[in-house]
Image (cartoon, grey):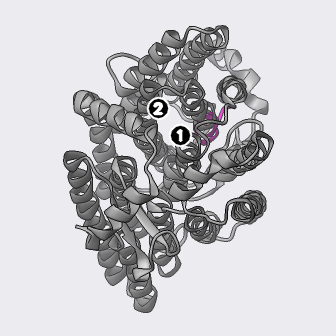
Amino acid sequence: MSALVPLLVTLPLLGAAIALIAGRHRRTQVVVSIATLAIVLVIAAVLLYAVDTGGRPIAVSVGGWPVPFGIVLYVDRLSALLVVVSSIVLLAVLLFSVGQGAADGDDETPVSIFHPSYLILAAGIFNAFIAGDLFNLYVGFEILLVASYVLITLGSTESRIRTGVVYIVVSLVSSILFLAAIAMIYGALGTVNMVQIAERMTELPQETQLVLHLLLLLAFSIKAAVFPLSFWLPDSYPTAPAPVTAVFAGLLTKVGVYAMIRTETQLFADSDVNLLLAIVALATMIVGVLGAVAQAELKRILSFTLVSHVGYMVFGLAIATPAAIGATIYYMVHHIVVQTTLFLAVGLVERRAGSTSILRVKGLMRAAPVIAVLYFIPAVNLGGLPPFSGFIGKFALFDAAANVGSPIMIVLIVAGILTSLLTLYALMRAWNLSFWREEDDSAETEARISYLGASPAATVETEQRVIPKIMTAATAGMVAVTVALTVFAGPLYAACTRIGSALLEPVSLVQLEEEVGR
């Protein structure tokens, strides 16, 4: 079984090389990309079943180096689950982009560049999730950075180059902070292996632990778009092509959240910054959702809700109980799927209506009822209406916070409920104006929403385009996955609960050596 672990990274890299060699052969690149991600999905599902039923993680020391000197790839329930979910999302978005490329040619997603970059992005995501040491986690982040900069600037328009520069500068600052933290940890502890760091961290003075802790949190908070370090996201994501925006929104910030979960539960379990995390979570939820309410463009609305809902995950980390960590992981899985689905649905709206401004788009319920359904289901899910997975995840977080019962937790529960209601308001207002409003609606309706006219991109129009069936099918498939998160909430939440409990039980270096040896 351990032989399958390195394939999670090597297969996408190999697929990227083949896609690059294939050059202008569109069909070959498409087949290679789809086959690669499909195989990774199967391998990840097998590994998830193995580690969940066996109750033991799978570790591989690359190159045969003894632990902890070599690069260790570490697959436990958390990393296996996230690789499975990421593979599903990456595969669905890839199918969406294939339909877009077939309809538009190379205008939006130049195939010779897109497919190799997309597979390298996948390799970076998978590498980050299974990294057993901080430096390999850093390498995963850098692979992500290189590939994402190429993807976010596809088409080479002025706006994409400008936002791409902002994105890469912010990402480089985060990477420098992360690398500095790794250097300080290695200087203090003589290792970058996460299991060994956890064992030796208690040997350091509390002040030193706090400095290392906050430096890593700062680096990961930039990548996760935690307020006030989220300023770059609402302007960066909406300018990219629809498939790129969807996969960025669904996955890239969650890699930062994943790194926060790993470090908070395993490296710094004895270093208490929960009050700071609670305050940051509160600000992230409220500021993000208020930004969404003030927008008139669908992609920007979703970008701000993305920021606000990262606050829920930080909220779970601030509670720091096994139940809260499990609820955080369940909510992260929910958000990856639902946020990606919403961006794909907005991509369909843009092609059908020629705009994503809720001031300009009208009458889509009559003109495109399928798109209306594909937007509505994940929208109410993200808003937290029962019985959807968004409600289940939020309720679990609120319940864990209520069990703690401190004043800051009560404030966070109230803020979480308010954020959920405002999210629902922003998404349903957009649905009402874009789908229910008819072309001949009265001037009174126009007057009521005139205050949104000064919002960024409120008047932007694009070309109306044909929607290939594969794009609709890919979006519908993701909507089905969002529904499955509700239908199978019991088994999934139980698995997340097991993950939460296991993360708070540290693995010893001896246990890691045994896992590598078997």
Q: Can residue 318 be seen in the rendering of this structure?
A: yes
Where is the C terminus found, in terms of image quarters? bottom left
Q: Position of residue 121 (x, y in %)?
A: 51, 67
The earlier-in-sequence mark between 1 and 2 is 1
**Above-or-below relation of 436 to 95:** above
Read off the residue under disc 2: 325
Local crowd at mark 1 within 10 Å, few (<14), some, or many (≥20)?
many
Q: Which mark is residue 131?
A: none
Front of the two marks 1 and 2: 1
Q: Is residue 253 left or right of residue 132?
A: right
Q: Can residue 164 be seen in the rendering of this structure?
A: no
**Above-or-below relation of 242 to 187:** above
Q: Quadrant of residue 415?
A: top right
Q: Which amino acid does label 2 sit on?
A: Ile
Read off the residue under disc 1: 265
Q: Are marks 1 and 2 in contact (CB under 8 Å)?
A: yes
Work out how far the residue at label 1 is from the one at label 2, CA to CA, in angstroms. 9 Å
Q: Residue sitting at 64 percent across and 49 percent down? A: 201
Q: Where is residue 1 in the image (x, y as percent from the top left)?
A: 22, 67
Camera-side residue: 351 or 224? 224
Q: In this view, does 89 lie to the left or right of 304?
A: left
Q: Residue sitting at 48 percent across and 23 percent down? A: 383
Span shown in magenta: 295-304
